[in-house]
Amino acid sequence: MQSTPPDSELSPDFAWAPYRPSVQAPWDTIRAGHLLRRAGAGPSLGDLRRALADGPAKTIDRIFHGESGAGAFNRQIDDYEVQGPNARPIDELRGWWLRRMIESPHPLLERMTLFWHGWFAISAARIGQPRAALDHVRMLRANAFGSFDAMLAAATRDPATLLTAEGAENFKAKANEHLGRQLLARFTVGDGAFTEADARDTARAFTGLFVRGGQLREVPREHDDGTKTILGQTGAWSDRDFARIAAAHPATARRITRALYRHIIAEDADPSDAVIDPLASAFASNRNIGQLVASMLRSNLFFSRAAYRRRIKSPVEFAVGLCRAFEKTVPTIQLGHALAELGQDLYHPPTIKGWAGGTRWINRQTMAGRINLARALFLGPGEIETRLAPGPIMAKYGDASPVAPAQRLLELLLQDNIPQATQAAGPPDDPAAIAFGIASLPEYQMA
């Protein structure tokens, strides 16, 4: 892929048409690796080679459905997470989630769960109850590809959401207008798309809902069943009606479409309304999250120069991608601590807006931290006790010659011809040093 897109790649008709391999845009290792990074965290050599053989359409189908055994895998992890009187401590839950990301047969599901974690930005520090935080993330995972109406209805009745939004008490005599503003500004239409009257009537719709002991409690006598007007619609609305009305609003569709564009396609430039509008309009009509994500992943724009290496990996993407590439799980409680120091502490988004992402992931300190983490993962010593072992992976895929590891590791980790990668890769007979050198390059920080 070259560095600048032609004008046709930015026209909506071309951008959102399905990608078809051609002489100008072949299905090759570069595009297969790009897809597998954005739809998960990164491929193994086996993933790359199967994707190349299957082609983009079949590969994307598999990405959405997951591998066989994904359901059983998730049930097993779910069972581990809930052990204990109030689930597990947050650092253990964080570790289990990282393990799920590394080992999951359905990596796109975990990526989308992480996206929604940033959207709702529910922090365990503000909840004080690990089980409530765990249940919130489980709710996000259950709805990650489904109807946004259903997700919003579940999220706005979720104790963790209400606690974080300071909406644990909603009396009829004193509706919680702060909660109303939070639900409109943070989760749905956004600032500037609602009035104070909308916020007041949204708050009235939530009267009668309380959080007690980490559980949702409904008190019917405290619900205001009078007429309310929310975002231009009038009726005797409840919280469920709010979810339906706000989810269907065009401003909500545009916000979510733009956020997913940054997450899946590119974050270095804000797309024009002309590019966003076709997908936002479709999403406003059906609110089907999976269809919106599929439209992006299958598009010409996704496989074009306008999307290639146009995102910076988050710390979780950086580390999980390395573990998945070398098909090994490291101690994830230790890994969780290391990633928190790099700025991404799962279950603890830093603000009510989640993680800012983009260039904020990288500065002199965090880049040094990434290099130190890569050194610990491949070479040690460091806080991660288990090493990733590139040598056995190269042997597994038939690369036993002393020259092959460097080329195969470049194929695996960068899928591109980058001259300085070869220079920085390390001694040709030391796969771990080669992998460390590649993972430390600026190019590897790009998704």
Image: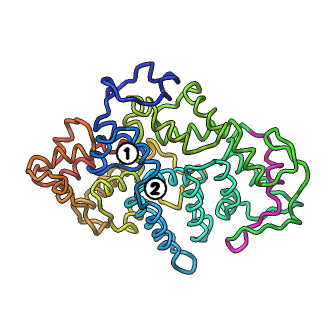
Give coordinates of residue 378: x percent, y percent: 23, 59
Q: Residues within 10 Å of mark 1 (few under 14, many from 20)?
A: many
Q: Is residue 211 magenta?
A: yes
Q: Position of residue 121 (x, y in %)?
A: 58, 54
**Label pair 2/1, CB-CB below 8 angstroms:** no
Q: Which residue ends up furthest to the bottom in the rendered image?
A: 85
Q: Which residues are magenta?
A: 194-214
The residue that disc 1 covers is 37
**Residue 304, quarter of the rendered image:** top left
Q: In the rendered image, which quarter is residue 5 located in? A: top left
Q: Which residue is mark 2?
A: 344
Q: Nearer the viewer, residue 44 or 384?
A: 44
Q: How is the image coloured?
A: rainbow
Which of label 2 and label 1 is nearer to you?
1
Q: Quadrant of the N terminus?
A: top left
Judge left or right: residue 367 versus residue 417: right
Q: Residues within 10 Å of mark 2 (few under 14, many from 20)?
A: many
Name, please, the residue furthest toward the right. 226
- The amino acid sitting under disc 2 is Gln
Q: Quadrant of the C terminus?
A: top left
Which of disc 1 and disc 2 is earlier in sequence? Answer: 1
Q: Is residue 49 left or right of residue 173?
A: left
- Which is nearer the eye, 371 or 171? 171
Q: Answer above or below: position of 368 versus 284.
A: below
Q: What SS does tag 2 mark?
A: loop
